[in-house]
Image (cartoon, rainbow, N blue to C red):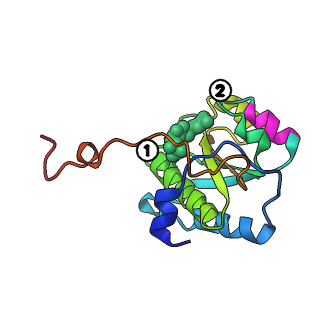
Amino acid sequence: METYRAIVTKRDTRAFDSKPIPEDVLGRILQAGRMAGSAKAAEPVRAVVVRAQAQKEALAACGRFTPQIPTCAAAVVLVLVPEPDQPPGQFAYFRGPFDAGRAGQNIMLAAWSEGIASCPVTLHDNDCARAVLGLPEGHLVANVIALGYPGGKDPTTGSRPRMPVEQYVRWERWG
Ligand SMILES: Cc1cc2nc3c(=O)[nH]c(=O)nc-3n(C[C@H](O)[C@H](O)[C@H](O)COP(=O)(O)O)c2cc1C
């Protein structure tokens, strides 16, 4: 799929087919996440791939709007490692959320270019997610990317409309 078309047709999809994602395709998708740049080239993002049903269900219980996690083929959990040089017991994530967003969008667009739909999912309870995944202290789940071949209706339909471009873009100054 041509890049611009992949970007503008990608919609967040919550209905998946049960078909698994082939290993080579999943490998390319993860590689796309790994190649995202990061502030100071710090590479604070890691990916935990969850495919086991019980593990997906346990993860879903850590968020509030998560029904797509148990039914997806693979949940890619984007984890932020804490920034270095912090006082003991304190953790900082100054630039990490933007870095995780870049990785997540790379993953979703690489997936969509291969016909695989996706949805970002928030895990509101980080302690719960840490326990399920066995994350070390201070590691933060930025987001989960639920991946799978589309199930049900056409994934490019039924999305939320966007604001008009005139409202979105300002030129030179805000007002
Ligand atoms: C940071 C972030 C967190 C999100 N968390 C959730 C979530 O917890 N559950 C969910 O169903 N959708 C979640 N979404 C998906 C949004 O609801 C979706 O991007 C929005 O509805 C636009 O969807 P569309 O592109 O299909 O129009 C999240 C999206 C983002 C960017």
Q: Which residue is mark 1?
A: 94
Mark number for residue 52? none
**Which mark is first along the chain, 1 or 2?**
2
Q: x, y percentage for residue 54?
A: 87, 39
User: Any magenta on residue 78?
Assistant: no
Mark 1 Cβ and ligand 1 under 8 Å apart: no
Q: CA distance from mark 2 to mark 1?
A: 25 Å
User: Any magenta on residue 56?
Assistant: yes
Q: Which residue is mark 2?
A: 64
- State which quarter of the image contains the N terminus: bottom right
Q: Which stretch appears magenta?
A: 54-60
Q: Is residue 163 left or right of residue 67?
A: left
Rendered residue at 78%/61% (across/down): 21
Amino acid bearing label 1: Phe
Rendered residue at 48%/65% (across/down): 5
Q: Secondary structure at mark 1?
A: loop
Q: x, y percentage for residue 88?
A: 56, 37
Disc 1 packing (10 Å; few <14; some 14–19; many ≥20)? few
The secondary structure making up most of the magenta span is helix
Give the image quarter of residue 64.
top right
Query: Height in image: 59 above or below 29?
Result: above
Quarter of the picture for ligand 1? top right
Disc 2 packing (10 Å; few <14; some 14–19; many ≥20)? few
Asked if residue 111 can be seen in this view, the reply is: yes
Q: How many discs appear?
A: 2
Query: Height in image: 91 above or below 35?
Result: above
